[in-house]
Amino acid sequence: MKGFLSIAVALFLFAGPAAAEDRFTFVDVYVDSGERPLAAYQFELVDETRAAKIVGIEGGDHAAFQRPPYYDKAAMKGDRVILADFSTAKDLPRGRTRVARVMVHLSGGATPRYRLTLTTAATAGGDRIPAAVSIQTEGDAR
């Protein structure tokens, strides 16, 4: 038992503080289509500090976008991802809608700086619409 306790203390001293700084968090992405129904979107999310490692993608709040959006799995292994989705549902969201949640891992107490670029947003007929895109992180709204 004494040997086990010594090993546990050694592991805590060497791995404990660094592991305590690592954390998992999320970035919620919103598209605001105004009065127009949102049927499709594409955007790029980048961490300019390269501190965030993207570890998962989840869908949004509205039924039209509840499944995870399409993304490039190879790009997800880094600090950026391009997400896109479309819906053929009759009931489409209008206004500000959470379309995705991007799960990230932060190492060493790092603070990411996200850049979000909307490539396109469209209605069910494929007409481009002016839209705004924004993010909300755990404990921080933008």
Image (cartoon, rainbow, N blue to C red):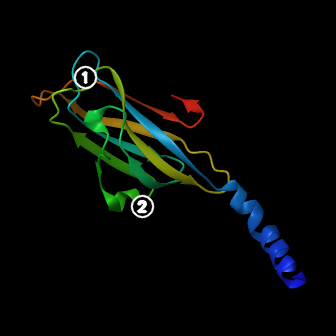
Q: CA distance from mark 1 to mark 2?
A: 30 Å
Q: Which residue is at a point 81% across and 74% down the rendered structure image?
A: 8
- Residue in the foreground of this view, choosing between 95 and 46: 95
Q: Is residue 44 left or right of residue 123?
A: right
Location of residue 127 (image quadrant): top left
Is residue 30 in view from this perspective?
Answer: yes
Name the element at disc 1: loop
**Residue 118 lies in what quarter of the image?**
top left
- What amino acid type is highlighted by mark number 1? Pro
Q: Secondary structure at mark 2?
A: loop
Q: Can you give x and y, in whole percent of width and height, for residue 2 in the image?
A: 90, 82
Q: Position of residue 70 (x, y in %)?
A: 27, 49
Residue furthest bottom as drawn: 3
The N terminus lies in quadrant: bottom right
Asked if residue 23 is positioned above or below residue 34 in the image, the reply reads: below
Q: Residues within 10 Å of mark 1 (few under 14, many from 20)?
A: few
Q: Residue at x 57, y 37 (%)?
A: 138
Q: Classify 10 Å Cα crowding around label 2: few (below 14), some (14-19), many (20 and above).
A: few
Count of numbered circles on the image: 2
Q: Residue flagged by tag 2: what amino acid is it?
A: Lys
On residue 77, the disc is: 2
Disc on res. 32: none
Residue under label 1, please give it: 130
Percent of width and height locating residue 24: 57, 51
